[in-house]
Image (cartoon, rainbow, N blue to C red):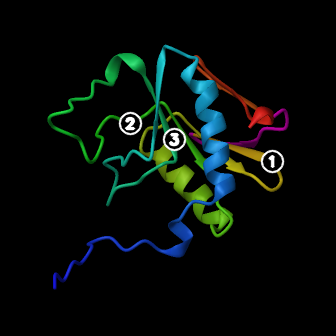
Amino acid sequence: MLDIQFPLKIKSQDIPSLNHSFICSRILRQLFDNKAIEALTELTLDIGNGITPDICIYPSEIIHPNFSRDITRMQQIPTVAIEVISASQNIQDVLEKAEQLVNEGIKAVWTIEPYTRTVFETKKNKEDILSAQIAEFDNIKIDFLTT
């Protein structure tokens, strides 16, 4: 009998929910129409011990996958990151993660709280709640009302 041990244990709070997955897919639909960007899901960034936003948005010209050699920790920082809060996550923890991402060079982090349909925007030295639920940064625009 094989004794297989996994180095990373998944906590129940780290498991995305149906609403989380649904919202991420609706956001991706909007982003895929913009050919100037690449929207990548669950990409681990080379920050600290590794941080994995739900969605990372990069200018399309800097993403060049090599299918014979993968990258497990992305060193280039995305322009925008998106976090969707799952039912078992603490909103404060996710907003602190957003602040950490911005402090590492991401220009904007949009955090979506599905139950109240609230979008928190975190930028360097600035936090806002987007009342219109439309977020825009550079050439990236998402209408969160359609998610």
Magenta-colored segment: predominant secondary structure: loop
Callout 1 amino acid = Arg
Quote the CA–CA distance across marks 3 and 1.
18 Å
Mark 3 vs mark 2: give the one in front.
3
Asked whether disc 3 touches disc 1, contact meaning CB atoms under 8 Å apart, the reply is no
Callout 3 amino acid = Ile
Residue lying at 50% horizontally and 14% vertically, measured from the top left: 35
Nearer to me, 31 or 73: 31
At label 2, counting other C-alpha atoms closer than 10 Å, the crowd grade (few under 14, some 14-19, many 20 or more) is some
Name the residue carrying label 1: 117
Residue lying at 48% horizontally and 20% vertically, measured from the top left: 37
Query: What element does badge 1 sit on?
Result: loop
Residue 146: percent from left, percent from top? 78, 33
Asked whether disc 3 touches disc 2, contact meaning CB atoms under 8 Å apart, the reply is no
Query: What element does badge 2 sit on?
Result: loop
The image's mark for residue 55 is: 3
Callout 2 amino acid = Ile
The tag earlier along the polypeptide, 3 or 1, is 3
Q: Relative to 13, does residue 117 appear above or below in the rendering?
A: above
At label 3, counting other C-alpha atoms closer than 10 Å, the crowd grade (few under 14, some 14-19, many 20 or more) is many
Q: Relative to 4, does residue 67 appear above or below in the rendering?
A: above
- The boundaries of the magenta stretch are 124-133
Residue lying at 68% horizontally and 65% vertically, measured from the top left: 87
Residue 74 relative to residue 52: left or right: left
Residue 124: percent from left, percent from top? 56, 40
Q: Image quadrant of residue 26?
A: top right
The image's mark for residue 77 is: 2
